[in-house]
Every structure is written in C-alpha cells, then in structure tokens.
Image: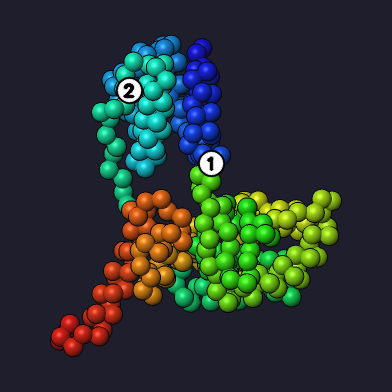
Amino acid sequence: MKTFSKELNSFITYLKIEKNASPYTIEYYKNDLEKLFSFLNTEGIASLNDVDHKVIRVFLTFLYEQQLSRRTVSRNISTLRSFFSFLEREEIIDTNPVNHISLPKTEKNIPGFFYTEELEKLFEANDTSTPLGQRNQAILELLYATGIRVSELQQLQLDDVDFSIGTILVHGKGRKDRYVPFGKFAENALKKYIYEGREKLVTLAKTPSSTVFLNSRGNPLTTRGIRLILNKMVERAALTIHIHPHKLRHTFATHMLNEGADLRTVQELLGHEKLSSTQIYTHVTKDHLRNIYMNSHPRARK
C-alpha cells in the first residue's frame, strides 16, 4: 500500500517554511490529502504522475457521494491545487491535473450575530466577584470589543496588552501581527481580571505563565476551554441559542458596520487578507440602512 509520505512531508515543510501556514491549516491540508491517497490506493494508482484530470474528477465524485458540502469539496479542490502546483514546481510531476478543475459554487451562509438584548443578558451572566467570573467577563468583553478569533485570544500574553493606549497586539493567521483597540468596558473587565482574579489563579500553577487567560488550575486556557466557558454563559443567561466564538466576531463586524465604520477599517481590525471576506457582513448593514430609510424618508411609504 503506497502512503505517498515522502511527497506529503515535502509539501508540509513547504507550507511551514514558505507559506507560514498555521497548524490548523496544515492539519486540514493533511486530512484532505490523506483522503486522496486512500482513494488512489483503492484505485491501484501507485504514482502521482499517473494522476490526471479524469482521476481527479472521479475522486471528486467520490467526495460528493459521501454527501460532503460544496464548501468542503471546494476546500479539497483548493488543497489539491496547492499540492499539485507544489509537485509541478519541484518537478516531481510533469503537469498539474487540477489546473482545469473548477470550484463548485458554494452556498453563501449569512453569518449569525447577537442582538443587543441577547448581548445584555450575556454580559450580566457572570459573577464578577470570583476570579473565574472576572476571567469569563474579560473573555466576553474582549471578544466583542475586538472581534478577534478565539485562537488569537487564547495566545494573548500579558505583554500584548497595552492599557496606556487601549490596544492589544494580536498574533493572527500566517504569523501576521496587528494592533486592535478596545474600549472602556473591555478595559475595565481586563484590569479587574488581570489585577485581581488572575493574580489568584496564577498562584495555583506549578509553573507561572504569562498567558492572559488561565484555567482554574492556573494554566493557560485552551481554545476548547474558551468555547465551553462561552456555552456555560449562554446557559446562565437562559438563552435558547447556540453560541460559537465566531458569533461574537460576526457581531463585532456587523455592529461596527451598522454604526458607520468603513469596510477597509473592519477588514484590518478582523485581520482579513481579502476584502471579500469582510463583505459578507454588509448583508446586515443593507437591511439596517433600508429600515432606517423606510422609517425616515417622508416619501418612502404612504
């Protein structure tokens, strides 16, 4: 059984060194390619040079038969394009079999966001007299105030927080750093946690950490831990909604645009490489503007 491990390892090295890809991205690429390699073994194809566009099309049919979403299939195709382009560049194969394979049209999922009333209930859900409650409040305030990803929040170090100018240094995707400002509510919550609750939590750890957000044993929180904390907040607020950390990021972007922030600024704050990634949030602002127009213009309605 051919594993194609040599080609895979070379590609992963290229992703790490040349593309500065995150561990999450590399894991996705690896999983996608292992599906391809398993398929090639089933088909009795032992050389990547024998993979042509017909083989790729049969492989995509195989993916669709597994009832994968168009978005997942699109990601697989993108992985294959990158992989075979790399092999072609390194002269491991003669031609790229994915060159003329088009991406399926993906359904555009409108991002969910919190309404003001829901946010107010969330902000009241924590007992800020306890170290963990102070931590949870700081997590919630900071995620909403900055729109950062949970992975970025999890990596935040004490030296990354600058209270003098109200900014945090965020270590984003692809090792791209950016400064993001935060407001008074987030500042108050962070100060209360860092100077009170965190001081107590850090004493519980065998090895002191400079990571901002700690668990109940004084060790750095994981991204999974942050998700669990947010879900418990929803339960305490008695909300019948499903929360995922990106929902706070979506809410940040939506509210910023609704209040008049320009798209480029929101793009920079979110750390989006492409403006098209940010434009998905304009759907809400269009509805918002239309409602204002219909309620405000003298001749908008009878």
Q: Secondary structure at mark 2?
A: loop
Which kind of residue does numbered mark 2 sit on?
Asn
Relative to 51, residue 115 above or below: below
Which kind of residue does numbered mark 1 sit on?
Ser
Relative to 272, residue 166 above or below: below
Along the horizontal axis of the image, is 282 left or right of 229? left
Relative to 178, residue 166 above or below: below
Residue 96: which numbered mark, if any? Answer: 2
Residue 22: which numbered mark, if any? Answer: 1
Query: Which residue corresponds to the image point at 78% horizontal and 62% vertical from the top-left?
Result: 201
Query: Which residue corresponds to the image point at 40% horizontal and 59% vertical from the top-left?
Result: 267
Q: Residue 285, how many percent across, how many down?
A: 32, 69
Which mark sits nearer the N-terminus, 2 or 1? 1
Q: Nearer the viewer, residue 265 or 219?
A: 265
Q: Bin the neighbour count of mark 1 within 10 Å (Cα to Cα): few under 14, some 14-19, many 20 and up.
A: some
Query: Which residue corresponds to the image point at 38% horizontal and 75% vertical from the top-left?
Result: 259
Distance between mark 2 and mark 1 Cα atoms: 25 Å
Q: Residue 163, how many percent across, how many down?
A: 63, 70
Q: Is residue 263 something that shows in the picture?
A: yes
Residue 145: which numbered mark, if any? Answer: none
Q: Nearer the viewer, residue 302 or 50?
A: 50
Along the horizontal axis of the image, is 233 left or right of 43? right
Along the horizontal axis of the image, is 274 left or right of 187? left
